[in-house]
Amino acid sequence: MRVAEVGREKQENLRHASVTVLGSDLSARVEALYLAGAGIGTLRVDEVLSGDVAALNSEVVIETSSEKSEPENDLRVTDLDPTAEQIFRGASRALRKMKAIFVVS
């Protein structure tokens, strides 16, 4: 998988990164799939999500974890229906993690 918009160097940083996704709810699934699609090298996810991640990107090294997520307080989701809220939360966490990888590099 590749994200052309980030350039070759940052794509390599993603490929060498290791990221943990907490939980197994819809927001965790969205987060894991976004990260796998972006080309993260190693994803630590709940066993429930491992098959979806592998199906999306077979190049991702998958480690399983049973760590649970902590509730988030984000005022931007107050008017969203519950499903949209979960999707928003997962996508936002994935984006924050990718940005953190880019800043470190």
Image (spheres, rainbow, N blue to C red):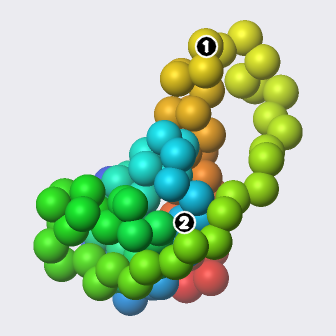
Q: Position of residue 3 (x, y in %)?
A: 28, 58
What residue is drawn where x is 61% and y is 27%? Answer: 85
Helix, strand or loop status at disc 2 = loop
User: Callout 1 environment at 10 Å: few (<14), some (14 to 19), or many (20+)?
Assistant: few
User: How far apart are the two marked residues, 2 and 1, measured between alpha carbons?
Assistant: 23 Å
Q: Position of residue 63 (x, y in %)?
A: 40, 83
User: Callout 2 environment at 10 Å: few (<14), some (14 to 19), or many (20+)?
Assistant: many
Q: Amino acid at mark 2?
A: Val
According to the picture, the residue beneath numbered tag 2 turns out to be 21
Report the front residue among 36 and 52: 52
Q: Amino acid at mark 1?
A: Asp
Q: Position of residue 12 (x, y in %)?
A: 33, 82
Report the front residue among 104 and 56: 56
Which label is found at residue 81?
1
Q: Position of residue 33 (x, y in %)?
A: 35, 54
Q: Image height check: is 96 above or below 74?
A: below
Helix, strand or loop status at disc 1 = loop
User: How many dots with numbers?
Assistant: 2
Q: Quadrant of the C terminus?
A: bottom right
Q: Quadrant of the N terminus?
A: bottom left
Closer to the chain start, of discs 2 and 1, is 2
What residue is drawn where x is 38% and y is 61%? Answer: 48
Which label is found at residue 40?
none
Q: Image height check: is 95 above or below 83?
A: below
Q: Quick check: can you spot residue 16?
A: yes
Quarter of the figure with residue 15: bottom left
